[in-house]
Image (cartoon, helix red, strand yellow):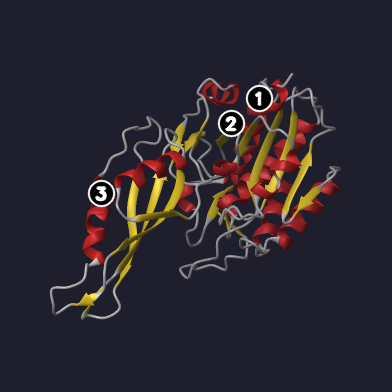
Amino acid sequence: MNFEKAIELLQRLIATPSVSRVEGDAADIVEATLASLGFATHRKCNNVWVEARQHNSALPTILLDAHIDTVKPNASWQRNPYCPTIEGGRLYGLGSNDTGGSLVAMIVAFCRLARREQPYNLILLASAEEEVTGVNGVRAVLSELGDVDFAIVGEPTSLQPAVAEKGLMVLDCVARGKAGHAAREEGVNAIYEALSDIEWFRTHQMERVSPLLGAVKMTVTGIEAGTQHNVIPDECRFMVDIRVNECYQNEELLAKIRQSVRCEVTPRSTHLNSSAIEAEHPAVKRLVDMGKVPFGSPTLSNQAVMPFPTLKLGPGDSARSHTADEYIMLDEIREAIDIYEKVLDNLIIEKITRRDETVG
C-alpha cells in the first residue's frame, strides 16, 4: 500500500460511521484491505490484526496498534462529519485525527517493514472500543496476540513520542449521616460530613511527583444529596476524577485515599493505570536521535491496558480530537509513515523475561 491508497482508505473509514461498540462496518473495511494486501487476517469482535510473517517464538514481538472507533460527532460540526473533504492539505472528517491518520500510516509502514526480514515479530492491530475502554476492545485480544515485548500506540501526538501517560481512576464516594427535621436540632447532616473529605480531595498533594506527568490530580466533579428542603439528608454522594502519574499504581493510591478520608470509597475500576517507558529503550533512543522530544501525555489511550512497554506516537494534534470539524494534515500522515518505518526498521529489542520462562 502506498500513500495515495492510504488516503483513499482513510476517506472510506471516515465515510463509515464507527462509534464505539458499533465499529463492525469499519472493521470489515480494514479486514478486507489487509487481506487484499496478502496478509492472513484475524478478528475477534471488531478487532482486526495481522502478522508480518510466520511467528518465530525465539524473537521478541512488536505491536502496532491504532483504534478504529470514534466518539459521537458533537452538535458544533459545520461540515458533514461523515463526508471526507480535502481542502488546503487538510482532510476533514470524524476520526481523521483521532485516530484514522495513525491507522493508515501504520498500515503503510507495516507493509514496508514486512517486505524485509526483521529481528522481531511484527503485529498490526486495528482495535475497537478504545474511546470507551470497552471489554471488547484491545483487552479482548491481548491474550490472542501472544507475548508482546513493545508496542507503539497510534494517537495524535504531533509525531513526538509520549513516553508516559496518566492513568485514570474514578471514585464514587458516600458520606452518611442521619435523617431529621431541618427545623429541629436533630439528625446528622451528610453534606456536612462530606465537606472535610471533599476539602481533602481539593487540597491534598500526593507525595510522589513525576518529572514527566507532574503530580497526581484529584478533582471532585459531581455531588448529590437531599430530597427536600426540610429534611436533613442522611446520605451525600460525590464523585472524584483522579489522574494518576506513573509513580503510583491505582490500587496503591486507592489504599492511601481510604486511609485518609471517612466516607465510603468505591472505584469504578482500577485497571486504567499510568504507564511509562524507560528513556534508554532502543525505540525512545532512536526517536531522540531523530530530533523528537519525549513528553508525558495527560490523555488516556490503549496504553493503560497494555502490560508491556509502550509509547504513544502518531500524526495529528491531540487538541483536534473530539472537536467539531476535526481534520488531519496530509503531510502529517506522510511524515508518520516514514517515522514509523525508521523507528522500527531493524530495531533491536530484548524479549521480556516472564515468570513462566524462568521456571526450571
Quarter holding residue 359:
top right
Could you tell whether 66 is left or right of 77 in the image? right
Among numbered discs 1 and 2, the one appearing first in the sequence: 2
Q: Nearer the viewer, residue 57 or 173?
A: 173
- Which amino acid, mark 3? Trp
- The residue that label 1 is drawn on is 352
Mark 3 or mark 2: whose residue is earlier in sequence: 3
* SS category of the residue bearing label 1: loop
Which of the two residues, 24 or 73, is positioned nearer the viewer here? 24
Q: Is residue 230 left or right of 156 when viewed as pictured?
A: left
In this rendering, the answer to whether 35 lies above or below 187 is: above
Residue annotated with mark 3: 200
Give the alpha-carbon distance from disc 3 to disc 2, as whole Å. Answer: 34 Å
Q: Earlier in the sequence, mark 1 or mark 3?
A: 3
Residue 226 visible here? yes
Measure the C-alpha gap from mark 1 to mark 3.
40 Å
Residue at image point 67% right, 55% down:
136
The residue carrying mark 2 is: 309
Identify which amino acid the numbered label 2 is placed on: Pro
Whether residue 166 is visible here, answered yes or no, is no
Secondary structure state at the residue bearing disc 3: helix
- Label 1 neighbour load within 10 Å: few <14, some 14-19, many 20+: some
Quarter of the image that includes the N terminus: top right
Q: Position of residue 258 (x, y in %)?
A: 36, 47
Amino acid at pointer 1: Ile
The percent position of residue 357, horizontal first and vertical second, equals 72, 23
Give the percent coordinates (x, y) of residue 10.
67, 53
Foreground mark, 1 or 2, reads 1
- Observer-side mark, 3 or 2, equals 3
Local SS, label 2: loop
- Circles 1 and 2 in contact, beta carbons < 8 Å: yes
Q: Please report the residue visible at 82 percent of the width from the left and 31 percent of the height from the top.
A: 55
